[in-house]
């Protein structure tokens, strides 16, 4: 394999990976520019194996999107709708509680809850959502509100982010999901989501959360108008932030789905680009413990293959996915834990059901 990697022009990167040395931005760019997916996969799998061995993770979770009404209206998003739109919705706290009640007989350990930037729901609504869910399922871990929503909630509360997070933690917030990061580049944000929180502010909220003892995830929405350099800058900013705080748990590359968005003339990403993003992320983000292949975005079959290209996690059962499906995802809205176990086993890994913080719930030997 060494000869093969050298022929692919990646010999110096192989040497660094073998020695556990950090890759430079130039290395990262070279990886993104390579078309040799097997060489990328081999390198990324070495790092994955060093960090996670034979194990591959999944979680029994439930997604709830409390509202899609949004003032940001990003061009890549089919989920967000203006207030007054026929396609807009907002759930009452009672409706969200009912969604939790409906699945009380399932062994769900995490509720993943995000929504749009709503123009007039008060801060108390968000606190009541957390309290309400905990009332019904006290042991559940709530992973909720992206850094973009947290900034909005701090504005509503009229308090600094630190104090806002303390109130949310007290009400039941367990961790913060990785959405809203998109691509940090100001050029991309100006062209696609000019009203959204800046990349720097997203990173500051994440680091503040880490300092308050909250773990968070990070994403990158790839496959639209961003350049390889901009992808790499995004990963580099995440790696630097993680050096500072160590609070990120997982990185999740999100493949752009164009349908029903203002960017619908663009094509879906290809399998090679999907695998490449997983592999480069695994190689470049040497301080991130986990890389997720989110099956909703890239399909369960490619997510399974991604377990040999740097990913160690397939995310979860999800139950009801709205954001990607409004943008044309052709995957199911849920997947059974038995299917996840089978996909992982057939990839040659030991399936491990985890909780949000990667504590082991069950090893499916
Ligand atoms: O924030 C919006 C992205 C995110 C589209 O933290 C789109 O473990 C593709 O962040 N095509 C929501 N993506 C999903 C998300 C997530 C999912 C699973 C696990 C975790 C985690 C996080 O989806 C949004 C936005 O960045 N998005 N529109 C689209 N058309």
Image (cartoon, rainbow, N blue to C red):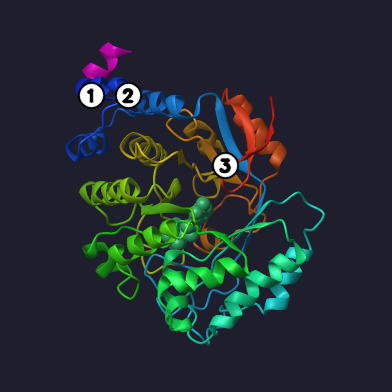
Where is 17 relative to 202, above or below?
Answer: above
Within-10-Å neighbours for mark 1: few <14, some 14–19, many 20+? many
Within-10-Å neighbours for mark 2: few <14, some 14–19, many 20+? many
Give how far apart the Cα atoms at labels 3 and 1 are.
32 Å
Residue 128 pos. (x, y %): 64, 77
Check contact, mark 3 vs mark 1: CB within 8 A.
no
Q: Which residue is mark 2?
A: 39
| Marks 2 and 1, the one that precedes in the sequence | 1
Give how far apart the Cα atoms at labels 2 and 3 are.
29 Å
Name the one closer to the observer, 145 or 41.
145
Is label 3 in a helix, a strand or a loop?
A: loop
Horizontally, residue 102 falls left or right of residue 364, namely: right
Q: Which residue is mark 3?
A: 358
Name the one closer to the observer, 263 or 59.
59
Q: Which residue is mark 1?
A: 10
Horizontally, residue 145 falls left or right of residue 194, namely: right
Image quadrant in which you'd find residue 71: bottom left
Question: Does the beta carbon of the residue at mark 3 sit less than 8 Å from ligand 1?
Answer: no
Q: Give me the residue at 73% from left, 70% from top.
A: 97
The stretch drawn in magenta includes residue 7 = yes
């Amino acid at each position: 394999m060494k000869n093969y990697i050298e022929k692919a022009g990646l010999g110096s990167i192989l040497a660094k990976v073998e020695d556990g040395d950090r890759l430079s931005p130039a290395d990262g760019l070279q990886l993104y520019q390579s078309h040799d997916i097997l060489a990328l996969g081999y390198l990324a799998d070495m790092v994955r194996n060093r960090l996670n061995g034979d194990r591959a993770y999944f979680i029994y979770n439930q997604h709830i999107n409390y509202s899609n009404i949004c003032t940001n209206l990003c061009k890549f998003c089919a989920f967000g709708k203006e207030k007054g739109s026929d396609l807009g919705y907002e759930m009452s706290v009672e409706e969200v509680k009912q969604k939790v009640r409906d699945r009380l007989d399932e062994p769900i350990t995490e509720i993943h809850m995000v929504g749009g930037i709503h123009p007039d729901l008060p801060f108390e609504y968000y606190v009541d959502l957390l309290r309400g869910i905990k009332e019904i399922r006290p042991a559940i871990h709530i992973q909720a509100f992206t850094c973009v929503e947290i900034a909005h909630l701090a504005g509503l509360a009229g308090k600094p982010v630190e104090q806002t997070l303390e109130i949310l933690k007290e009400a039941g917030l367990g961790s913060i999901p990785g959405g809203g990061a998109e691509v940090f580049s100001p050029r991309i944000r100006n062209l696609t989501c000019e009203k959204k929180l800046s990349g720097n502010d997203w990173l500051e909220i994440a680091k503040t959360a880490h300092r308050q003892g909250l773990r968070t995830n990070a994403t990158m929405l790839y496959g639209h108008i961003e350049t390889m350099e901009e992808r790499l800058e995004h990963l580099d900013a995440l790696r630097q932030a993680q050096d500072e705080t160590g609070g990120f748990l997982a990185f999740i590359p999100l493949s752009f789905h164009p349908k029903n968005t203002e960017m619908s003339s663009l094509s879906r990403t290809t399998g090679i680009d999907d695998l490449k993003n997983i592999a480069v992320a695994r190689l470049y983000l040497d301080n991130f413990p986990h890389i997720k292949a989110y099956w909703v975005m890239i399909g369960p079959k490619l997510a399974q293959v991604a377990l040999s290209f740097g990913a160690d996690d397939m995310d979860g059962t999800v139950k009801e996915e709205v954001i990607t499906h409004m943008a044309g995802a052709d995957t199911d809205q849920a997947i059974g834990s038995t299917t996840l176990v089978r996909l992982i086993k057939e990839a040659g890994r030991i399936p491990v059901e985890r909780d949000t913080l990667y504590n082991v719930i069950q090893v499916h030997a």
